[in-house]
Every structure is written in structure tokens, then in C-alpha cells.
Amino acid sequence: MEFVEQLKSKARENKKRIVLPEGLEERTLRAADIILEEDFANVILIGKPDDVLSEASRLTLNNIGKAKIVDPESHDKIDEYVDLMVEIRKKKGLTREDALMLIKKPLYLAAMMIKAGDADGEVAGADNATGDVLRPAFQYVKTMPGISVVSGAFIMILKDKEFGENGMMVFADCAVHPNPTAEELAEIAVATGRTTQSIAGFEPRIAMLSFSTKGSAKHEMVDKVVKATQLAKEKAPDLKIEGELQSDAAIIPEIGQKKAPGSDIAGKANVLVFPTLETGNIAYKLVQRMGHAEAIGPVLQGMAAPINDLSRGCSVSDIVNLVAITANQAAGTV
Ligand code: ACO
């Protein structure tokens, strides 16, 4: 697919170090083998080296020998990372003993490798729930300056090229923040607009979704989206943002013009911002499975370093694609 091939070729020019903490997980190992074969990132796998190499051999993967393999139980940076952990979380009461236990967990080790500058990005989640991947990242890598809420966007590549931007759309938040306030939803909308510009590579037309279009229903949940729309427009006057819109009014031109006459976004939206995580997560999975769309992501928006989380239902190519995005984020080429 052209979009992913472009990402890989940009990543190949910079060869960033991407840590995959689930070094014994089969799809992760298969993905690592492909990434190393295609040579677009330097792969760091976390796991006992003998176990990782014997699993690679069982799966007849020929490139895993090119990866750096870090043993979480014994490596020469344990003390350095533990000191850093205690320094970052001392106000939260983290002791050296606690940190020594945590650093042996691959997801904490990966976060600390990034924090210490020993890795440029991380992709995990094939074997771990999203919360478990995100917590170490939130606690130690933290958010970008000025960002209070991290969210997750999917780049959706649809079979039907009539929707979005020639079949490409961006959906958010589908992965992280369960019930955003209006202020947080506004921040998510702006972050998703920026992800669309930088990674998907097109100018966003953002629909703030609801079960109401332009006052057709009255409810506090609608009020939240109306307020978020207004705040998002104030935060980013350069972005095209419309709300509140129902999903049909957002993506079907005739319905958009009927329900939101005069809008230059209604019916032509290429970015959908969902009012809650529930709606975003359910929607992207239905479009992916029933609409046979490719769902690339979730791309985490607002982290201080590129850390991206997979769905546990991911395929090998989902992992390869997300590593290509992460490597580009790390290189600043998206
Ligand atoms: N953005 C930035 N920081 C955050 C966010 C956020 N969205 N959420 C929590 N944090 C911070 C907290 O402020 C806290 O920081 P501190 O410890 O320095 O004070 C730290 O992260 C840990 O917070 P907790 O309160 O321990 O964690 P919480 O219980 O809020 O959990 C989590 C956060 C794990 C992200 C939770 O909101 C969650 O589980 N979300 C749903 C994830 C999920 O299951 N997604 C669906 C699957 S993904 C998929 O299908 C692709």
C-alpha cells in the first residue's frame, strides 16, 4: 500500500531505534523479522536472549539475529534506570525497592529506555492491555509540554474511495481517554487535526460527532460536544472544525447539506472526533471488520516521545505499519 511504503522509505533514511517490549510474542517477532529484513528501523527486543533466539528459530525467522536483545533481568543499565525512576516519582512515594521490581517488567524497561535516550520509540500491546502499556509511559515519559490529555487516533483506509480524503479518514479518540470533558475533547480534536496534517498528510475537515446535528437534540452530552467544538475552534483557528454533527451528516454530502446547510465540512468530513472512547473504539472496530478497512494505529497523540499501543487483536502487518509510523515520529519526518 502506497501510504505505508512511503512511511517505510522515509523511516529507512533515519533508521531509528524502536523498542518492542513483547520480545517473545509471536506476531511481534514476525513483525520484527520483517522490519529487519526491510531495514527501516533498528529493532530492540526485550526478553531473555536465549529464549528470544530459540523462539525465532522455531518460527524460522532469519533476521532476528540483527536485533538488539535486552534481558530485563540483567543488563548493565538497571541502576541508572532505577535512579531515574526514583527521581521522577519520588513525590509519588516510589522507593528504590519498588523501582527495582518495576524495572524488570518489560513495559517499564521500555519506557525507561526511551526516557534515558537509549531508544527512540516504542510499540507494544500485542500481548498487553492498553492500560498496562500506557501507564508506564504516562508516569515516566509523560506528555508533551502544553498537553494535558493523551489520545489515540486511527488512520482508516477505506475500500470506498468516496469517503474522506480519497478513502482515507482519521478517527479519534479510539484508544485512551474514556470520558473526556469538553476542554479535553477540544484538545483531542486539535491534536487529531495535527496528526492528520503530519502523518496522514492531508488537510483535515474535522467533524465533532454526536447524536445531534446543529441542535436537533437537547442533552448534556450534546452540550459537551457543542462546547468542545467552540473551544477547539478558539484553540486552532487555522483548522476546519464543525459540530455538533451526526455521523451521516458528517460523511454523506446530501445529508450534510440538509441537516447543516451552508457548512463546508458537513458531508465532507475526513476526520471524525468521537465524543467518548466508547463510541470511538466501537466505531473503528466495526468499520475495520465489517467495512474491511485497514486501521493503522492507534497513533498516540500528545506523548513526549513516540510510544504507540496496539490492539491485542492486531495482525503482523498492523505491528509493522505502526513501527513505520513510530520511526517517522521519532525522526520528526511526520
Ligand atoms: N493523558 C495523559 N495522562 C494521563 C491520561 C491521559 N489520557 N490518563 C491518565 N493519565 C496519567 C495520570 O494523570 C497519572 O499520572 P500520575 O501518576 O503522574 O499522576 C498516570 O497517567 C496514571 O494514571 P492512573 O490514574 O493510574 O491511570 P488511570 O486509571 O487513569 O488509567 C488509562 C489511565 C490506563 C489510560 C485508562 O484511562 C485506561 O485504561 N483507558 C482505556 C484504555 C483502553 O482500554 N482502550 C481501549 C483499547 S485500545 C484498542 O482497542 C486499540
Image (cartoon, rainbow, N blue to C red):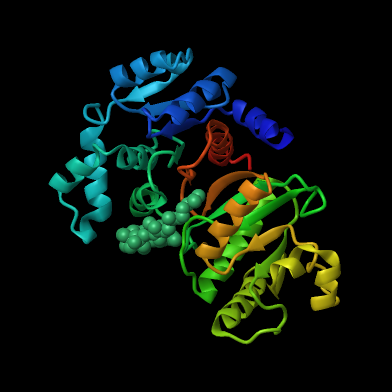
Q: Quadrant of the C terminus?
A: top right
Q: Indicate whether 259 appears above or below 83.
A: below
Q: Identify the residue at the far bottom of this view.
A: 218
Find residue 243 and report its horizontal and vertical position in percent: 69, 74
Quarter holding residue 185: bottom right
Which residue shows up at 48% across the image and 45% down it?
A: 311
Image point 70% across, 67% down: which residue?
247
Front residue of this view, candidates 80 and 53: 53
Q: In this view, does 204 lie above or below 56?
A: below
- Give the left or right position of residue 161, taking residue 136 as reference: right
The N terminus, quarter of image: top right
Q: Residue at x 56, y 66 (%)?
A: 187
Query: Which residue sits at x=67%, y=72%?
Result: 233
Quadrant of the image where one finds ligand 1: bottom left
Q: Is residue 176 visible?
A: yes
Left or right relative to 89: residue 266: right
In x, y percent, where is residue 241?
71, 68
Q: Position of residue 21 (x, y in %)?
A: 37, 34
Furthest toward the left, the residue is: 97
Q: How many marks?
A: 0
Q: In this rendering, does residue 260 appear at all?
A: no
